[in-house]
Image (cartoon, rainbow, N blue to C red):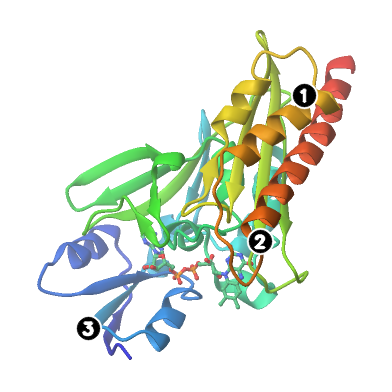
Amino acid sequence: MASIKEVVRPTDLQDLLSIIADREVESRLVAGGTDLLLKYRTQPGPEISIVDITGITELGEIIEESDGLRIGAAVRLVDIIASDVVAERFPVLAEGAVVVAGPQIRNMATVGGNVCNASPSADTIPPLLVLRAEAQIVSASGRRSVPLDRFFLGPGKTILDRGEMLEALWIPWPTTGAVASYTKLSPRRAMDLAVVGVAVALWNNSGGLDARIGLGAVAPTPIRAMAAEEVIKGSVKMDSSLATEAAQMAAAGISPISDVRGGADYRKKMVERLVTRLLVDLGERVGEQQEA
Ligand SMILES: Cc1cc2nc3c(=O)[nH]c(=O)nc-3n(C[C@H](O)[C@H](O)[C@H](O)COP(=O)(O)OP(=O)(O)OC[C@H]3O[C@@H](n4cnc5c(N)ncnc54)[C@H](O)[C@@H]3O)c2cc1C
């Protein structure tokens, strides 16, 4: 079992960044602790300092900016679910947050922790991918911003370098008339990880339909089904045959593993079925908005 040397809770971001930049000390960031503390209770490892990020006010804020919404890394899932602006402009993100674990976990867990834990089955990530979220990263030496679909390297691995942390997730305001939805398939209704998670966003622009499709639990990282998105791009109308064609493309592009939650073939079939269903449903909603 790893021993925790100390827990520090800075209240100033620059202080926090100097702590994690210090190469003499092995430190780990903690937000809600629902993933991290479990890990350190069960895995052997070196002595570490835990750096609690929840004392930094700005990391817990949701801010409406002129071009998009900035969600601090330490915003809790319950706050995402309760946010009026998320409900109004990005309901698909709340759909992802509300199916994470149970109420006790959602009360502690943060969106930044869900993202940085980099689990292939994390429920907020497919919604964030279809919303074109960017990861805003900060360190003692500066800031950088990366599209979220380039943030993940493998299970539990991200592009964050030593001394860097996720400061916020930034989401551009959606195109007028865009609709999106997330569906999680899991054996139990609560407290279970996704066997497959599918988020789809669909909208119309001057060149026809456009879509983004995010998939969880079917690859080493959450991914976008870009080939399926291409099938839809520019189409005049969503119907069941276009939805099926795109969904087959999404399923053909993945090589999921078989594990206790489901076999690889089952996961592929479920991706095809869920993508088809979401595209047909969202296609009707986009169509209704055009007629209105
Ligand atoms: C019983 C149980 C059921 C669960 N069910 C689900 C589920 O259904 N769906 C799901 O998606 N998840 C589930 N989880 C996983 C977990 O609750 C989430 O991943 C949670 O959102 C993590 O947030 P946190 O704030 O608790 O992260 P923490 O545990 O505090 O941190 C997680 C990781 O991210 C790092 N980190 C945190 N914040 C930052 C930051 N700002 N910058 C850089 N690194 C950072 C930490 O160092 C750590 O490695 C479950 C967990 C448990 C224990």
User: Where on the picture, by quarter, is residue 239?
Assistant: top right
Disc number placed over residue 242 in the picture, else none: 1
C-beta proximity under 8 Å, tags 2 and 3: no
- Element type where label 3 sits in the image: loop
For label 3, the residue is: 46
User: Where on the picture, by quarter, is residue 124?
Assistant: bottom right
Taking the spot 80% from the left edge, 17% from the top edge, the residue there is 237
Q: Is 2 placed left or right of 245 in the picture?
A: left
Vertical placement of residue 257 versus 125, above or below: below
The residue under label 1 is which amino acid type?
Leu
Work out whether mark 2 precedes mark 3 in sequence or the reverse, and give the earlier one: 3
For label 2, the residue is: 195
Dot 2 beta carbon under 8 Å from ligand 1:
no
Of residues 150 and 270, the one nearer the viewer is 270
CA distance separating discs 3 and 1: 53 Å
Vertical placement of residue 21 versus 179, above or below: below
- Element type where label 2 sits in the image: loop
Q: Is 270 placed left or right of 65 in the picture?
A: right
Disc number placed over residue 202 in the picture, else none: none
C-beta proximity under 8 Å, tags 2 and 1: no
CA distance separating discs 2 and 3: 33 Å
Nearest-to-viewer mark from 2 and 3: 2
Of residues 105 and 68, the one nearer the viewer is 105
Image x and y of residue 41, in percent: 41, 88
Looking at the image, can residue 63 be seen?
Answer: no
Vertical placement of residue 176 versus 162, above or below: above
